[in-house]
Amino acid sequence: MRLGIFCKTFARPDLPANLDAVRDCGLDCVQFNFSCAGLPSLPEKIDLRLFSAVACELARHRISVAAISGTFNMIDPDLAKRGEGLRRLNVIAASCAQLGAPLVTLCTGTRDAEDMWRAHPHNDSAEAWQDLLASMEQAIQIADQNDICLGIEPEIGNVINSARQARRLLDEMKSPRLKIVLDAANLFRPGDGPRMTEILDEAFDLLGEDIALAHAKDFRDGTAIEHVPPGQGMLDWRHLLRRLRSAGFDGPLILHGLKETEVKASLAFLRREMEGTKPRPPAPFASEFLHDGIEFHYETVGFGVPFFFQHGLGADVSQPFALFQPPGGIRLLGFDCRAHGATRPVGPSEKISIAGFADDLLGLMDYLRIEKAVVGGISMGAAIALNFALRYPHRTLGVVLHRPAWLDGPRRDNIAVFAFIAGLIRKHGPEKGLALFKESDAYRQTLAKSPASAASLAAQFLHPRSAEVAVRLEKIPLDSPGFDRRHWRTMAVPVLVLANDRDAIHPLEFGQTLAHEIPGAEFKEVTPKSVDAERHREETQNCLADFLLRHF
């Protein structure tokens, strides 16, 4: 589950400034409204140049669109207004593909001719229901033509004014295009506060599997319902978030209906509540497999499309498993490479290589009877994945390269420091070797550029068999995933490249170069670990989950 916001929350003179405000809040997801691009919320037409400009700004700010607002009164007493609303909905729907939006949100409407959010006594009439069905049938045809979904939200003032009414509409329309936008604060009428758990549970029991988007606002109960920012009302957020997760919802939770000055406190509140209700990840299943005379330690968690995510130099399988928790439908796998982790013995030194590790990955796939998989990795693991994809394309579904440390040749700048570390371990042992290393210019220079890189280098001394496995520090930096980048252009599967700046071992430009030269590769820049380790993990989690669920 990730947080996002209505982009209309920020009043700015143009779209770039609006999206700057979104990013300044630490958010990368919005419910988009065309009013932020200088048009009406439901525009009569959209110039193709504006389409491109909006898409470019979203990409430049690295902001995804969870939904586009397409609200109009679907049971307006004026039939001509309904028809015009549907025509403009078609304009909105046609924009979704270019903006990457899977959903358009709707208003099921009211018989009130002046305010489409205000209740009216005729909303419960049979005529109002039939008008809604007629409008919704045309809206679903528009969704079919544009390959999108439509989101309806139970609203006290609308014809769909309860979870039961929403369930009735879903059942009568019988369309996979029709989904639910759940705003829990909109489920309550005056006096309903004491029935909090009952009302929330009923909504999830009826609608849980159809929720595509969640809205985040709060309420206070009294003679009238007062809507307030999250954390300032009485909504049971812990129960709501647990029910969202138990329903399998892993989509965006979008803030709205608040002032810009209230955003920071609301985000802090929601982040605390989300962290407090986060379920413990399932423990990975750990085992061994015998291959080429080596007993390899491997782990796996989850079910679905196999995704092998390999660790970096000197790390082990716990590194990728701590960085990424697979969403439903994805199976995460990884193993300790030769001379790493619990895999032993080290074996012949000539097989301590990136290609050798890729062959070991193939051996694990064969052992587990996995015909094809997404392959990926961190640093050295990214090199293994790239080598595997180039040599075994018939076994590759997709590729993930996280903080790549190689291009098409050895890293001459890194060879000396790793050889220095190996020499210290062999001559002085790990404890004294580490002390000497921390006194060296190599360590001090790395620390000044990237504390995370310096910590990674220092960690090479901490392996319980550091002297035995020092060969990896002598062999791997001299290696490369390949020696001709022209081979990259033969890749014909989905590829995601993640990189960050302020990292001497994993330069940002390496990721940019790979993404530029691999056909169709997606590139995402993430926050450096040395700046904010938790944000680095969250952004990696979101990018990987989004990539895997979109493509596989």
Image: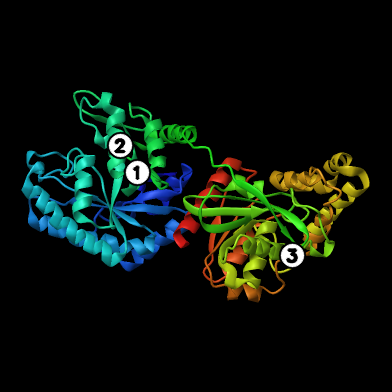
Q: CA distance from mark 3 to mark 1?
A: 47 Å
Of residues 373 and 112, the one nearer the viewer is 373
Quick one: SS at disc 1?
strand
> Which quadrant of the figure has residue 281?
top right
Q: Are marks 2 and 1 in contact (CB under 8 Å)?
A: yes
Mark 2, mark 3: which one is toward the viewer? Answer: 3
Q: Earlier in the sequence, mark 2 or mark 3?
A: 2
Give how far across and how far down residue 377 sits, in percent. 63, 57
User: Could one spot residue 44 in this view of the protein?
Assistant: no
Q: CA distance from mark 2 to mark 1?
A: 8 Å
Closer to the N terminus: mark 3 or mark 1?
1
Q: Amino acid at mark 1?
A: Ala
Other-residue count near label 2 (Cα within 10 Å), few / some / many at <14 / 14–19 / ≥20: many
x then y, percent, for residue 525: 56, 54
The residue that mark 3 highlights is: 356
> Of label 2 and label 1, which has the lower sequence position?
2
The disc placed on residue 214 is 1
> Residues at badges 3 and 1 in contact (C-beta under 8 Å)?
no
Q: Percent position (x, y) of residue 289?
A: 69, 56
Q: Which mark is residue 184?
A: 2
Residue 213 visible, this angle: yes
Query: In terms of image quadrants, where is residue 46?
Result: bottom left
| 19 vs 347: above or below | above
Residue type (three-letter) at the residue carrying disc 2? Ala
Q: Is residue 158 left or right of residue 483?
A: left
CA distance separating discs 2 and 3:
53 Å
x 81%, y 55%: residue: 346
Q: Is residue 347 above or below residue 12?
A: below
Q: Quadrant of residue 265?
A: top left
